[in-house]
Amino acid sequence: MGATYDAVIIGAGMGGLSCGTLLAKEGLRVLICEQASKPGGYCVNFKRNGFTFAPAVHYLNEFGPTGQMNEAFQTLGISPEIEFCPQDPQRRIITPQFQLTLSTDIDQFERDLIHLFPKERLSIHAYIEEWKKFVKSIEGLPLKSLEVISPKEKLQLLYKGILKAPLLIRYRGKTSQAVLDSFFKDPLLKYLLSFGARKGSSILNCASPIFWALTGNFYYIKGEGVEALPQLFLRQYQAYGGELSCNTLVTKIQVERGEARGVQIDGGEEIRSRYVISNGDSHATFHSLIGKHLLPNRFIQKLRQKEISAPIFTLYAGVDLDLAQMGFDGSLIHYYPFMDDNPWEEKDGGEFDVSKEKMAIRMDSIKNPMLAPKGKHTIAVAAYTPYELFADGETVNPRYTQIKEEIAQKIIGATEQVIPGLSSHVLVQDASTPLTYERETLNTHGATMGWYLSAKEFSRIRSQRTPIARLYQAGHWTFPGGGIPMVILSGINAAKLVLKDMRKFTNKFRVPLLSPKELL
């Protein structure tokens, strides 16, 4: 790796892979450095005694015929060799009081909701109609960075965003709580439609499931599951000549005269490059890889004010239960063991009890039988769990193993209300704590979606540029946010910023404006 590259990308998550693929497609010499043993970030699988698990909950919207991933795949020159299958219902909601199916047929979902809350009939209808208008108004609104589009496109976007999508302006800085309070009185209904959003959350936290139901744009990957996606991107990236180095930890971004000029990897080797793109954690990028002394004080202060997304604990179980025979269809289950009258109320700081937290239950092997031995199934249950439970300052809590086992048993006990007899049918068991996620992905405290998307954060337009010239960001810590489709788009945007900068450099020195391929 002693050669000089046009671009070095830190991290082979989906944002890094999409960025690298576009740059390599345009003829640049690209290296992706990945600290893990394989690419994918959260989009990976792991095996335990014949069972295959995915460590994270994934919502594959935007992969349908009208979704933005069609254009993304065309931009990257990727043929969709994997099969994206429509998922209906998109999820099931189970509470001690009732069960509800969130259909991708929004009218059916409305009828089901009214059946459960007949006194809120008019409010439910008004709420659904409002989001129908919202979705219609933003149809075709691209998630392209303002920094990469032309002045004409900016004007068109401004016209559509302000004149054609007034609801986008109306709700941009609103919290989930404010919006739900303006429509409903029933606290149980508000709790349900919050979808677990925490205090200060933006409307996207509670409205996204409604959007997906309105568009019918919800899918799963048939076969080996989500890991097929980074493998597909990797094949195309390498076909364009892109290079990947796994088990390669970047320890420093080299900065000279205010410009990124390469990276240093564990062991001290330096890799020179014209551009650096960080697909990693923002804390690590700016605090560890660069250092505060090279960054403006105002920028550092803004970083300190940001909140990170919630860490989770995930239990994995291989079971000898026939889950399909028990009536499960493989849809994601949101299980609420406990329904609070006020989901926005700050906790009193008492002892944490995971058995009262909302749980996301996945049974991926029902739709993808190859993930488990014949006649058996996989179960993964994720729930919010404080990072501080497992860490003692900068070190691991001495009771780490004991706490991990206690939480796993509590989750199994709570999940038995949904899957009867679970505890006596577990053949294989494992778990990921927030520390596990932090170690495997280098996301601070195991953050699941980068920065927490509060209403205040949603009202800002995040930049993929940084205070360091020739250093850009991709991934869920930057524009347009978290989730697989969003980070793929962020990678494309980052690559376009690099290409745009190259063209500016060409014009500055009066060189004919050529494509990157011709430049090289």
Image (tube, grey):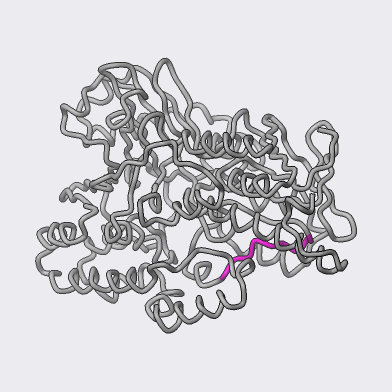
Q: Is residue 440 or residue 325 the one in the foreground?
A: 325
| Looking at the image, residue 69 lies above or below residue 134 | above
124 versus 31 height, above or below: below
Q: Position of residue 451 (x, y in %)?
A: 55, 57
Q: Is residue 210 left or right of residue 204?
A: left
Residue 393 percent across, percent down from the top left: 64, 43
Does the magenta portion include 220? no
Residue 464 vs 249, above or below: the answer is below
For image coordinates 55% across by 74% down, the residue present is 153
Point out the stretch of residues depicted in magenta.
461-469
Give the quarter of the figure containing the N terminus. top right
On the image, the x and y values in percent for residue 169 come to 43, 79
- Residue 296 in view (yes/no): yes
Decide whether residue 462 is among the magenta residues.
yes
Q: Residue at x 55, y 34 (%)?
A: 436
Residue at (53, 33) in percent of width and height: 231
Q: Identify the main secondary structure in magenta.
A: loop
82 left or right, relative to 250: left
